[in-house]
Image (cartoon, helix red, strand yellow):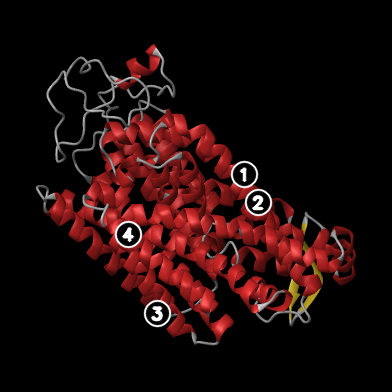
Amino acid sequence: MITFGVFLIAMVMVGIVTHEETTTFDDFTVGSRKLTAPAAALSAGAADMSGWLFLGLPGAVYMAGIGATWIAVGLIVGTYLNWRLVAPRLRVYTERVGAVTLPSYLEERFEDRSRVIRLLSATVTVVFFTVYVASGLLACGLLADEIFGAGFELGLTVFAVVIVIYTILGGFRALSVSHSIQGTLMVLTAVALPAITLWQLGGFGALHSQLDAVTPALLDPGAEASFADKKWTSGEQLGAVGMISLLAWGLGYFGQPHILTRFMSIRSTRDIPLARRLGVGWVVIVLAGASLIGLTGIAVLDKPLKNPEMAVIALSAQLSSPWLAGVLLVAVLAAIKSTVDSQLLVSATSLTEDLYRAFLNRRASDTSLLLIGRLSVLAVALVAYVIALSGGAVLDIVAYAWAGFGAAFGPVILLSLFWPRMTAAGAKAGMLTGALTVLLWKHIDPLLGPLESGLYEMVPGVLAATAAAVVFGRFVGRPPTLDWSDVAEDDTPQAAAVHSQVPSPPQNQTPWPPYPSSPWTGQGDGPTPTGRPSGW
């Protein structure tokens, strides 16, 4: 209790300290685009790995064995591709158009003066993130009840209040500082807890023998064991559908606003290679550690768990002193909080920038935007709190929200960065088709009769969104008037030529200073433009 109390107080102090530095809406939303490579890597990873990292994933592995780790494989591949393909271009594009949200970027990228793209993408962001935040708060309540016996509702309330306080006070700056601390705690627990359990067991050989004695299916990467009535049985083979569904989690990365915001906030594209290496390495360590926790829990715990998602908590309590257990379990809270606060901030930013400012008060002052942003954090948190009170499985809720973002935004984001002539109609069709497919797939799949697949919603959602975006993007509407060609990532004449073609900020934002003074002051990613592109 002391360890948790100190941690929560420290997070509030981070909010208080960074509050003095959060004086503008740009500070509140993207930290004025000043994230260093290590901070960006830790912040992206911590924002990504929510409560499911130490609750849902170990629980899935605890029930099904090695076969469930295909989720981790898909996530590692998705993390690498996201840093490699999306981060550099998104960083350059969003700064050039002055965008602090994905909806505002997409509106400018596709020159959509109807505002439909912004309204649609902002709605998807707020709806799915509210559900996602609810999963994090639910995990907080479960954690408090399991560890302290404090009651689900009390734990949920305490953690929600702390998260809201430092997010409102410090905004993005508070999150980036807290994520560096939380990301370090998470990787330490992912290494220390499996190491302790393996040492007590006698190494990997002893772990293999004990798992094989329970059921060989736990060690079969092509199968999933069955866990029921606190017993493991051989279960079934994964098959192509099961393996694709698990790997498909990696497809979601390209459309996650709380992760993509970190790419938008890094100080320069020159920092991205180092951030990519650090970020992917961090993800590999924490996912491998969380998977090992699930496996070692089968062999070490005195009796099978009633709730497999509590494997980390049970192992920490059984294998270590209360002080060490407190430190290890704080990392579980850190994983939950680092995602919840990111999602709260992105939702609040979208409500403020993409709904309030874009549709209600286009001339809103920076002070009023900052106030509305903070009030939006509170509003989203209250709705998510009510949803969380209804309970549910953490992994199930996360899977649903993750698929929603991945299908609605992923294909459109990738196509917007690599297909210069894609039209606004393609973006609208892709987002709408992806979101609706995820929402309705559980009702559609049973109607397919012999073609019923049981696939994870992400797969049909991404496929349908891609098809719709490509067809409508090719044949409906006019391509953008500006040439969104490849964006070079280094200081070359080609980079300058490309940068000079990227448009000015949206009309409802601060206009460029008169030429020849440069609008890019210290945050550039390559040479600054030497002039306006022809046609302006």
What secondary structure is found at the residue carrying circle 4?
helix
Real-space Cα distance between discs 3 and 1?
Answer: 34 Å
Dot 4 corresponds to which residue? Answer: 17
In this view, the residue farthest toward the top is 493
Amino acid at pointer 3: Thr
Q: Which callout, 4 or 1, points to the residue nearer the camera?
A: 4
**Quick check: 493 left or right of 462?**
left
Residue sitting at x 35%, y 37% = 426
Q: Identify whether 260 is placed above or below 175.
A: above
Q: Are marks 2 and 3 in contact (CB under 8 Å)?
A: no
Distance from Cα at disc 4 to Cα at disc 1: 30 Å
The residue identified by callout 3 is 157
Q: Which residue is mark 1?
A: 281
Instruction: Give the amino acid type for the residue marked by disc 1 in the picture.
Output: Gly
* Sequence-first disc among 4 and 1: 4
Please identify the quarter of the rendering in which residue 103 is found: top left
Q: Measured from the top left, where is residue 124 in percent x and y?
A: 35, 55
Q: Nearer the viewer, residue 168 or 410?
A: 168
The location of residue 480, given as percent across then percent down, is 28, 27
Q: Which mark is residue 285?
A: 2
Q: Which residue is rendered at x = 77% and y = 64% of the image?
A: 236
Q: Earlier in the sequence, mark 4 or mark 2?
A: 4
Judged from the image, the secondary structure of the residue bearing numbered disc 2 is helix
Q: Say which amino acid is labelled 2.
A: Ile
Q: Amino acid at mark 4?
A: Val
The Cα–Cα distance between marks 4 and 2, rounded to whole angstroms, is 31 Å
Quarter of the figure that contains the C terminus: top left
